[in-house]
Amino acid sequence: MSEHAETKTPESFERFLSLFRTSTVGIIATGVPTHAMHGHFIADGNLGAGKTTHGDGRPRVLAYADPEAALRNFGPRFNAGLPGEVLLRMAATDPRCEGVLVNSAIREISLIISKSTAQSLLTQ
């Protein structure tokens, strides 16, 4: 993420997207999870990811890269974790969403993954 923020090259964005897809990212979970066996929780159809309109006023899913580092550096700003791939699918299919805003865990920077980028990644 930091590399792309500095270089802004297509290659650095591709590396960021590749890492994002395979990583667990922090989210602000909305709705109520249902208790499952062994102390686990499952979504009951009402669980979702919080959105933000930060920047340009367009609604995007709010994500936090590297949740463990984000907790150490910025404190508890999220309450759940999801694979980036799942978050991309949510952003790509939600008609009221314009993409994902990913906050860095080590610097106060963020990157946007547009809805069209999320959709194209899911069709690859």
Image (cartoon, grey):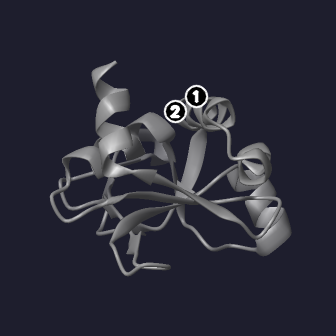
Residue 102 drawn above or below residue 86: below
- Helix, strand or loop under label 2: helix
- Residue 29 lies left or right of residue 26; in this view the side is left
Image coordinates for residue 51, horizontal then vertical, percent:
38, 71
- Residue marked by disc 1: 18
Q: Amino acid at mark 2?
A: Arg
Q: Which mark is residue 93?
A: none
Residue 63 drawn above or below residue 22: below
- Residue 69 lies left or right of residue 96; in this view the side is right
Residue 64 drawn above or below residue 36: below
- Marks 2 and 1, Cα distance to the nearest angstrom? 5 Å
- Helix, strand or loop under label 1: helix
Q: Estimate how packed mark 1 is, as few (under 14), some (14 to 19) or many (20 or more) residues with alpha carbons within 10 Å.
A: some
Image coordinates for residue 16, horizontal then vertical, percent:
64, 37
Q: Quadrant of residue 92?
A: top left
Image coordinates for residue 68, horizontal then vertical, percent:
76, 53
- Residue marked by disc 2: 21
Which quadrant of the rendered structure holds the C terminus? top left
The residue furthest top is 124
Image coordinates for residue 115, horizontal then vertical, percent:
32, 50
Which residue is painted at 61% across and 38% down in the image? 13
Q: Are the residues at dot 2 and dot 1 in contact (C-beta closer than 8 Å)?
A: yes
Residue 100 drawn above or below residue 4: below
Which residue is painted at 30% across and 60% down in the image? 98
Which residue is painted at 38% across and 40% down in the image? 117
Q: Amino acid at mark 1?
A: Ser
Which residue is painted at 84% across and 67% down in the image? 73
Q: Quadrant of residue 64?
A: bottom right
Of labels 2 and 1, the one closer to you = 1
